[in-house]
Image (cartoon, grey):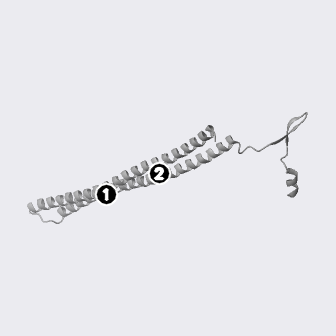
């Protein structure tokens, strides 16, 4: 094997290896990004719990303050004061639910992005192997072309007055008769 052949095969192997390494590097980066989005989703879930706790405390505080002010004035907790308290409670509960719903949407978006990065990770590895396989095939074809493996063998005869002339291979006519 000559230097040119060794260089051709070595370069092909190097390019195939580079494709594999690139696929694994892209996969690792995608997995890291996925873990960041999963961590973000976990933080949002924790934030949901804190938001619910704070909203419940605020609702209880407003209800307690309203009840105390009504009692201080000597009015019973029925009729208009009860309607106002119920309306305030309903509005605060709706605000809490909206906040929790928005946080849940953010969490689901983060989880969705994490899943997309996980798929990207798998695709990167597959692309690396595909690129390596393609490069190996291309190297084989280049080697075959360079070495003459794909060039049909020609048979010549030196005929006086005509020089070299292409002729049929030995036993060609014998083989053709057996078919």
Give the quadrant of the N terminus: top right
Residue 32 placement (x, y as % from top left): 39, 50
Labelled pair 1, 2 in contact (Cβ < 8 Å): no
Image quadrant of residue 97? bottom left
Marks 1, 2: nearer the viewer: 2
Of 179 and 62, nearer the camera is 179
Residue 120 placement (x, y as % from top left): 47, 51
Of 100 and 126, nearer the camera is 126
Residue 124 placement (x, y as % from top left): 49, 50
At mark 2, the secondary structure is helix
Give the residue at the far top of this rendering. Answer: 161
Label placed on residue 45 = 1
Q: Is residue 39 visible?
A: yes
Which is more N-terminal, label 2 or label 1?
1
Residue 11 left/right relative to 78: right
At mark 1, the secondary structure is helix
Residue 131 placement (x, y as % from top left): 56, 47
Distance CA(mark 1)–CA(mark 2): 25 Å
At x 34%, y 53%, the residue is 39
Q: Residues within 10 Å of mark 2 (few under 14, many from 20)?
A: some
* On screen, residue 13 above or below 62: above
* On screen, residue 169 above or below 74: above
At x 68%, y 42%, the residue is 147
Q: Is residue 73 visible?
A: no
Residue designated by label 2: 120
Give the quadrant of the C terminus: bottom right
Residue 137 left/right relative to 175: left
């Amino acid at each position: 094997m000559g230097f040119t052949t060794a260089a051709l095969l070595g370069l092909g192997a190097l390019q195939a290896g580079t494709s594999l390494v690139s696929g694994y590097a892209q996969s690792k980066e995608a997995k890291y990004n996925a873990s960041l989005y999963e961590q973000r989703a976990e933080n949002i879930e924790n934030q949901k719990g804190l938001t619910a706790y704070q909203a419940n405390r605020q609702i209880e505080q407003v209800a307690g303050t309203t009840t105390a002010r009504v009692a201080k004035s000597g009015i019973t907790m029925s009729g208009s004061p009860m309607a106002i308290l119920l309306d305030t409670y309903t509005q605060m509960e709706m605000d809490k639910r909206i906040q929790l719903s928005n946080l849940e949407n953010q969490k689901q978006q983060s989880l969705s992005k994490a899943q997309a990065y996980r798929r990207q990770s798998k695709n990167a590895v597959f692309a690396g192997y595909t690129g390596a396989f393609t490069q190996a095939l291309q190297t084989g074809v280049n080697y075959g072309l360079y070495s003459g493996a794909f060039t049909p063998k020609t048979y010549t005869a030196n005929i006086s007055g005509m020089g070299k002339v292409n002729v049929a291979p030995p036993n060609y006519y014998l083989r053709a008769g057996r078919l």
